[in-house]
Image (cartoon, rainbow, N blue to C red):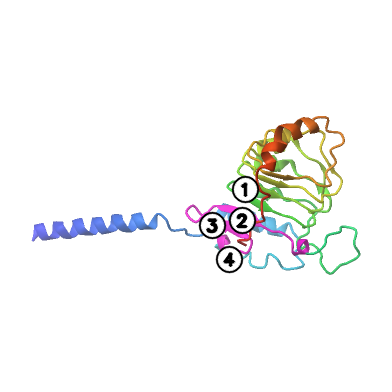
Amino acid sequence: MGRHRSTEMLFFLVLLCVCISNMSGITFGCIEKERQALLNLKQSFQDPSHKLSSWQGQDCCQWKGVACNETTGHVVKLHLRSSSMDYPFSPYSDDTTHLPDLQANELSSNLLELQHLNYLDLSGNNFSYSKIPNFFGSMKNLKYLNLSHAYLGGLISLQFANLTSLQVLDLRGLYDVSTRTFQWASNLLSLQYLDMNSVSCSNASDLMQYLIFRSPSMLLVPQFQLDPSF
C-alpha cells in the first residue's frame, strides 16, 4: 500500500514539473507598470480620430498599435503612425480632411517607462512644434525611430548618441529642425538608414567628415521598409 502511494506521489510530481515547464512560454498579458505608462501616454493626447479607442482593459498587448514580447510580456513596439501620412503631406495646406490622428502640446516622457521598447513610430502626429525631447537619448533599446512629419522642432540633441542600437532614424519633414554637429550620428554604428530631409545642417562643420565616414557602408544596405505587421 505504501509503495503504491509512493508511486502515485512520484507520478504527481513528474506531472507537476511538466506542467510548470510548459507554462514557462505562456504570456499572461502586459506588465502592469507598462500598461499604466501607456494609459498615461493616452491621457496626454487629444485623439479626435479615436485611434487609441482600443486602449482599455487589462491586457495592453492586445491594444491596437502595441506589440509585446510573447515570452516576457514587455512592450517592444509602438506603431502610432498617423493616417494622415497616407496622403500628400503639407503642414501649410488648408485641407482639413486629413489631419493628424494624435495631438499634444509636447511628447510625453511616459515613454521612458517602456524600457524594452525597440520600435517607435510617431510619424505624422501633431506635437505643436515643440522641441525634440532630450529623453530619447535614454531609450537605449530603440532600433527603429520614426518622427517624420511629427510637428517637432529645435536642435537634434547630442543625447541621440546614446542610441547605439538604432538601425533606422527618420527625421524628414520636421519643422525648423537643425543640428550643429554630427558627433551624435557618428556614434550610431548600427545605423543603416538615416533620413534628415528638411533638417538644417548648415552649421554642422563635420558634415562632410560624417558623410565620408558613413555613406559607403550605409549605401550598401537597402532602405528600411516600414513594418507592415500592424
Q: CA distance from mark 4 to mark 3?
A: 11 Å
Check disc 3: other Cα within 10 Å, few if <14, some if 14-19, many if 20+: many
Judge the density around disc 1: few (<14), some (14-19), many (≥20) Cα neighbours within 10 Å: some
CA distance for labels 2 and 1: 9 Å
Few, some or many residues within 10 Å of mark 2 (<14, 14–19, 20+):
some
Q: Earlier in the sequence, mark 1 or mark 4?
A: 4
CA–CA distance in space, label 2 to label 4 = 11 Å
What residue is shown with label 4?
Answer: 57
Mark 2 / mark 3, whichever is N-terminal = 3
**Do labels 2 and 4 touch, CB within 8 Å?**
no
Q: Nearer the viewer, residue 206 or 117?
A: 206
Residue marked by disc 1: 113
- Kind of residue at badge 2: Gln
Picture disc at residue 30: 3
Q: Which residue is mark 2?
A: 36
- x then y, percent, for residue 157: 76, 38
Count of numbered marks:
4
Viewer-proximal residue, 90 or 60?
90
Q: Earlier in the sequence, mark 2 or mark 4?
A: 2
Q: Are marks 4 and 3 in contact (CB under 8 Å)?
A: no
- Going from N to C along the chain, the mark reached first, 2 or 1, is 2
Secondary-structure class at tag 2:
helix
For label 3, the SS is loop
* Mark 4 or mark 3, earlier in chain: 3
Queried whether the magenta region covers residue 62, the answer comes back as yes
Residues in magenta? 60-86
**Residue 72 vs residue 188, the one in the foreground:** 188
Question: Is 222 colored magenta in this rendering?
Answer: no
At a point 65% along the width and 58% down the height, the residue shown is 39
